[in-house]
Image (cartoon, coloured by chain):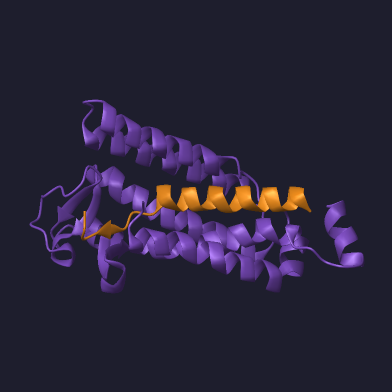
Amino acid sequence: MPGPGLAALILAPLLASGVMAVLWRGRFVAAAPLRGAALVPLVVVVSIAAAGLQRSTDLPNAVVNRTLAATILIALAAFLVLNRGQPNRLLRWGTWLAAGGAAGNATAMLVYGYMPVLAASAGLDPGVHPDPQYVAAAPSQVIALVLGDVLPLRPLDAVVSLGDLLLVPGCTILLASFLAPLVPTRGAHAVTAEGR
Amino acid sequence: MRNRLFVAAAAIATTGAAIAALAAPYHWSN
């Protein structure tokens, strides 16, 4: 089960995208379709495989984490290239917010071998590994300070990163664009949607 | 209609899994 912080980061875009898909259906249906959607399940599978490797092998955690981060960055680059011609401004925002957020987290993990979490925010000593994916960072580590988990959200029992915060609106927009054509309508609009 | 619901459910589930893979919040309870 994900912790409350991750659960909130997952549920917020899922709920908001449904509302956005209904409110801005016409805007999304008129946009060019999103490309590279197949990269999304690919990233999920690679991430699950990485977690499995950490549990079942003696491979150093930093090696697995860096391989996962590099794979994510390559997938994000491909996603951005595939969608570089998107004429719709809203979808361009969604693409860049989601890719930027994911790239921020992946870059931090690539640099340190673990997701850095600001020691002071997490109540840890610098250098400590509270989990195979995290390392406590000192404030003098600039990349950790910018891209790591630095923002404590007490009600959610979590410390989040800038990338986490960018992922939420980005994924909301991208999922809404996918859901919008599926929203039932009446009359001519439905014919238009089916014909796309 | 059933197909639309299935596609929507698959998209929602995949997006949720992708966020779980890409987001990296630290929990104090770790």
Colour in which the image shows chain B: orange
Q: Residue at x 47, y 40 (%)?
A: A43
Work out which residue is located at the far left of the displayed protein and give it: A125
Q: Quadrant of residue A187?
A: bottom right
Occupied quadrant, residue A148: bottom left
Q: Is residue B17 left or right of residue A85?
A: left
Counting from the top left corner in percent of width and height, residue A146 is at: 28, 62
Q: Position of residue A136 (x, y in %)?
A: 16, 54
Q: How many marks?
A: 0
Q: Is residue A193 left or right of residue A162?
A: right
Query: What residue appears at the point 13 percent right and 66 percent down from the top-left corner?
Result: A120
Residue at 70 percent across and 70 percent down: it is A22
Q: Is residue A56 visible?
A: yes
Chain A shade in the render: purple
Q: Where residue A12 sits: x, y (%)? A: 48, 66
Q: Is A13 drawn above or below residue A60 in the view shown?
A: below
- For the point 41% across and 47% down, which residue is it? B21
